[in-house]
Amino acid sequence: MKWDLIHVETIAPLALQVQFSDGTAGKVQFETSHLTGVFVTLREPAIFNQAYIDNGAVAWPGNLDLAPHAM
């Protein structure tokens, strides 16, 4: 199955509302303790809130992205 993200919206600190092309939708809540390495910059609200869709995956400035199946 190909996971294509078609909607992403910041709904709370470290939380996204997402929807996939197959209709699956839900909330993704990130924990600060999991944002390590290259993802540490997502702890900053100004960066996290810039989430957008790039090739069917959620992405952020700085070439950060999260594989759709990981959500």
Image (cartoon, rainbow, N blue to C red):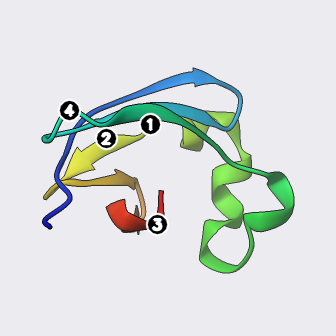
Q: CA distance from mark 2 to mark 4?
A: 18 Å
Between marks 4 and 1 in the image, the one whose residue lies nearer the viewer: 4
Q: Nearer the viewer, residue 11 or 20?
A: 20
Of pointers 3 and 1, the one earlier in the residue sequence: 1
Residue to which mark 1 is pinned: 50
Residue to which mark 4 is pinned: 23
Could you say whether the residue bearing mark 3 is in a helix, strand or loop? helix
Residue to which mark 3 is pinned: 70
Of pointers 4 and 1, the one earlier in the residue sequence: 4
Q: Where's the N terminus, which quadrant?
A: bottom left
Q: Residue at x 82, y 54 (%)?
A: 32
Q: Can you tell which mark lies on residue 52?
A: 2
**Total number of numbered labels?**
4
Query: Are the residues at dot 1 and dot 2 in contact (C-beta closer than 8 Å)?
Result: yes
- Does residue 42 lie above or below 69 as drawn? above
Q: Residues within 10 Å of mark 2 (few under 14, many from 20)?
A: some
Residue 14: x and y, percent?
Answer: 68, 38
Q: CA distance from mark 4 to mark 1?
A: 23 Å
Query: Are the residues at dot 2 and dot 3 in contact (C-beta closer than 8 Å)?
Result: no
